[in-house]
Amino acid sequence: MTDSAPPASPARPAAPPSPVDALLGLIRRGRTAESAVALRFIAVNDTHLIAPYHQSVLWLDRRVAALSGLVEIESNAPFVQFLEGLRAHLAGAPARMLSAADLPPSLAEEWSRWLPAHGLYVPAGRPGEAALLYARDLPWRELELRVFQEWLETWACLHRGLSRPGLASRAASALRRAPRALLRRPLLWSAALIALLLVPVRLSVLAPGELVPAAPVAVRAPLEGVIAAVHVRTNQVVAAGQSLFSYDDALLAGKLEVALEALRTAEAEERQFSQQALHDQRARAALAAARGQVQEKRAEVDYLRAQLARGTVLAPRAGVAFVGDPSEWVGRPVAAGQRILRIADPADREVEAWLPLGDAIRLEEGAEVKLYLSSSPLDPVSARVRFVSYEALRRPDGAFAYRVRAGLDSPSEQRVGLKGTARLSGDRVPFVYWMLRRPLAAAREFLGL
């Protein structure tokens, strides 16, 4: 005979965890939940670790928020309607064990249809915040009720922390409550609205603006002719007496040669008549006319020499020259008095704005102006109105606008010629007028009133 090993005894099933261990495990799961939705799932599905049940429901603010075994809840389903009616009946009740016999006949009939015989109702958190119902076929024990209460009070604290609304949610909730508050206090809100509409605000308009020289000296053509050369470029610093531009003097030089030849001829005739005047009476009479002819020709020569000397125009003062494109002037005929360029002090600048006809508001001397340059929009240039044109002027683009000049409040490092948008501030007006000024003007223009 051979020895044989005794048969192995069957493995014993693991003992279920005690209620205390199950409670601690649920608390750990609740602490690691990432969202309020996950925490609701634990409340209705994982609480069976403490005690078994068949169905469970979670109410939040008297609305069904979660059901065991379901992901989505249909609010119009008959079962959900029954649960909300049950919650309304149990509102304010303490934690208790209940059955269909504890309910009114209408709810008792629905209970027998939808739920097992024995239920455990446990409010959680603050009054009216949350409540849970667990139902099964076996009666509940008092120990299970106390453990469920401890677990669900902890669950309510965790849920409150995860579902705390942020700033955006609180703002949206306040906006949703605003219409109801307005209906409850119509006079108060109407008075607040009227007060808001009557708040005085500064009336301001926007207009195209530019930094320009405040008092430039215009250099004009001293005589009629053709420009031969421009000796400066725009934004160039020039000194007083520096050559700016010069004329083509070929025509004047030719006229001067002709005048000099005529003067020499007249002087020769004068000498001839002067010698003959000693013996000839008629020569004595022609001598006076010959002398007048000489004086006339000499005056013409002096005039042409002066004109020729003016062929090179000098800077009347020191400053910065603004001439545009110098090549456009070369070979171009100009009339006497025509402006060729400007010379300005680089530190003497101001704001020039063109106020559109539709935005013409009342601007007093000293009104605030801020110029937001396109090249530096975050560093506005502050100025004060010193001049507003009496009538609208034609702009270079063909539109009509009122010209506004404003002196700078303080020196600025921005150069002359930079453009941007100027904000011109007028008087204070009610907020309702500030909002409706342009619509009312458009309506009046459309209706012809």
Image (cartoon, grey):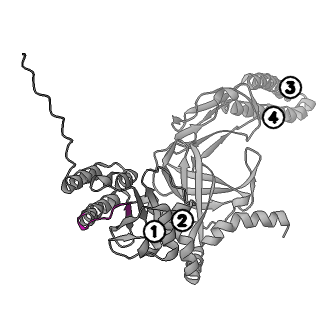
Q: CA distance from mark 4 to mark 3?
A: 22 Å
Provide the residue designation for mark 4: 296
Work out whether 174 lies above or below 32.
below
Provide the residue designation for mark 2: 81
Task: Determine the secondary structure under disc 2.
Answer: helix
Task: Tell me which residue sits at (90%, 35%) in the image.
Answer: 285
Image depth: mark 2 or mark 3 in front: 2
Q: Is residue 205 visible?
A: yes
Q: CA distance from mark 2 to mark 4?
A: 122 Å
Provide the residue designation for mark 1: 62
**Residue stretch rendered in magenta on the structure:** 133-143
Q: Percent from the top left, x then y, of residue 233?
A: 58, 31
Image depth: mark 1 or mark 2 in front: 2
Outermost residue to the front: 1
Task: Determine the secondary structure under disc 1.
Answer: loop
Work out whether 263 lies above or below 167.
above
Q: Is residue 83 visible?
A: no
Q: Is residue 262 magenta?
A: no
Image depth: mark 4 or mark 3 in front: 4
Which numbered disc, 1 or 2, marks the residue that appears first in the sequence? 1
Task: Determine the secondary structure under disc 3.
Answer: helix
Rate crowding at label 2 as few (under 14), some (14 to 19) or many (20 or more) other CA atoms within 10 Å.
Answer: some
Outermost residue to the top: 1
Q: Which is nearer the eye, 28 or 142?
A: 142
Provide the residue designation for mark 3: 276
